[in-house]
Amino acid sequence: MVVEVVGQDDYEGLRPDVVLGFHELCLVRDGGEWFMGRLDDDGSVICWGCYGSELAEAIRGL
């Protein structure tokens, strides 16, 4: 699992302890921070946004 970082060509790796899937979208918790991403058919995830440490805030972002 990786996160896209604006202005960088490479992705940063994530080591999540929780992944919550909502069809194609998902929330991933890494280091206490929630990231939103896309869950692909092969099980890979690319995240593009961080919503901080509050799950409720991340869910509102969906």
Image (cartoon, rainbow, N blue to C red):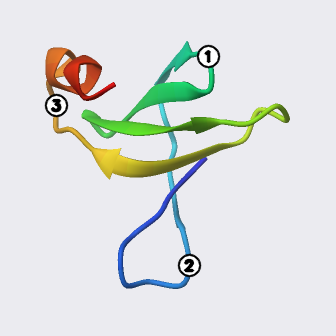
Q: Position of residue 20 (x, y in %)?
A: 49, 16
Q: At numbered mark 2, what does the secondary structure look like: helix, strand or loop?
A: loop
Quarter of the image where one finds residue 62:
top left
Inter-mark Cα distance, 1 to 3? 22 Å
Foreground residue among 1 and 39: 39
- Mark 3 burial class by Cα count in 10 Å: few <14, some 14-19, many 20+: some
Position of residue 31 in the picture relative to residue 60 (left or right) = right
Amino acid type, residue under disc 1 in the picture: His
Residue located beneath label 2 in the image: 10
The residue that appears at 53% across and 85% down in the rendered structure is 9
Position of residue 21 in the picture relative to residue 56 (left or right) = right
The residue that appears at 44% across and 83% down in the rendered structure is 8
Dots 1 and 3: beta carbons under 8 Å? no
Q: Which mark is residue 23?
A: 1
Dots 2 and 3: beta carbons under 8 Å? no
Residue located beneath label 3 in the image: 53
- Mark 1 burial class by Cα count in 10 Å: few <14, some 14-19, many 20+: few
Q: At numbered mark 3, what does the secondary structure look like: helix, strand or loop?
A: loop
